[in-house]
Image (cartoon, helix red, strand yellow):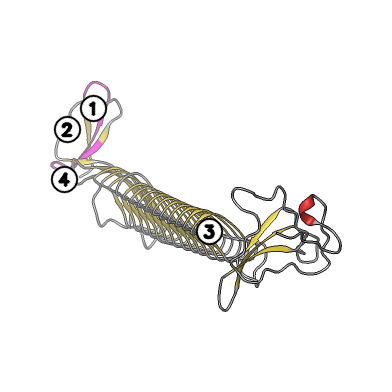
Amino acid sequence: MSTLKVNNIIPFSGQTVNIQGDFIPSNNTQSLGSEANPWSELYVSTGSVNFVTAGPPAVSVAKIKAGGEVNAGVGPIQGMIFTETNNLRGSFSVGRDNRASGTGSFTQGLANTASGFYAQAHGFGNRATANYSHAEGNATLADGALSHAEGASTSASGNYSHAEGNGTIAIGSYSHAEGYQTTAFGGTSHAEGYWTTASGDASHAEGYLTWASASFSHAEGGNTIASGQFSHAEGSNTIASGQYSHAGGTMTTASGMGAFTHGTNLEAPGIYQTVVGQNNIIGNSSSLFVVGAGVNSGLRKNGFSVEVDPNTYQAHVVIPVNPGNPQNPKSGSMYFNVANNFLYIHNGLAWRSASFS
């Protein structure tokens, strides 16, 4: 082989070659170095290393840049930048089958997609499709602007929403769903626990199978429902359907506006009515205050109540009513005997009566 000279320089003798033009191969089958004889160092300026298909036609599909891009006029971006097409800037992908197609987006892992501007997806099969969104874990979706989905099969579609756990969904703006199969539909709503739903704006559902369906409502515990605005249902199988109502305990219902129940198997249908105890008489909406004293749902009874005349608004007290003396009384115990129309009071030793017939 004859000696190759470039500008009177023999390049294969160890001398440096300076090129003042492009260095282009005759076709696209040529290699620069080899596995056995790699180049020691590769220096590239703020220009790019471009990846081009074989063609024809040859198409630039990706590039690597190290600094030099202008960030909205602020200054150069430092560090490695990976851009998948010539029309996108600042995206970066690591792993396999990932797609970072949004400006300034990032993917890491396997089969992730970050298509929103400055979006981030990492893990397996996650998608961050909205601007500034973040999806991580397994099969999560961040579809709302500035949303965050993490865990497994979670979805954050509301703007500024957050879904975490397994199968959780945050649909409302600023909503938060966490736990297992929870859903936050309402704006600024919060659902947590197991199969809870917060569908009202600014509502909160927590625990197991709870549902806060009205604005500003709160359901907690197990199988509770808060369907009235500003209502609160807690405990087990309670329902607060009236505005500003509260149902607590187990199997209680507060359907009147501002009604309050706490105990077991109670009903408060009256406006601003308070019912406590157990197994009160149903359908009573006129009493202001009731103490339920029934044995069970088949034997309901009111032990004590405060009534108000609907015409004069004068209040009166209704004491317990019995056909005979109760067993094991305490000193000061009082009841009205319907068998003889006597009022009985226990003095600590015996029942004493007074007739009002």
CA distance for labels 2 and 1: 9 Å
Question: Local crowd at mark 4 within 10 Å, few (<14), some, or many (≥20)?
Answer: few
Question: At numbered mark 1, what does the secondary structure look like: helix, strand or loop?
Answer: loop
Precedes in sequence: disc 2 or disc 3: 3
Was residue 41 drawn as part of the magenta stretch in this picture? no
Number of the front mark, 1 or 3: 3
Residue carrying label 4: 299
Precedes in sequence: disc 1 or disc 3: 3
- Horizontal relation, residue 69 to residue 203: left or right: right
Q: Amino acid at mark 1?
A: Pro
Labels 1 & 4 near each other (Cβ < 8 A): no
CA distance for labels 2 and 3: 62 Å
Question: Local crowd at mark 2 within 10 Å, few (<14), some, or many (≥20)?
Answer: some
337 in relation to 178, above or below: above
Residue carrying label 1: 329
Labels 2 & 3 near each other (Cβ < 8 A): no
Labels 1 & 3 near each other (Cβ < 8 A): no
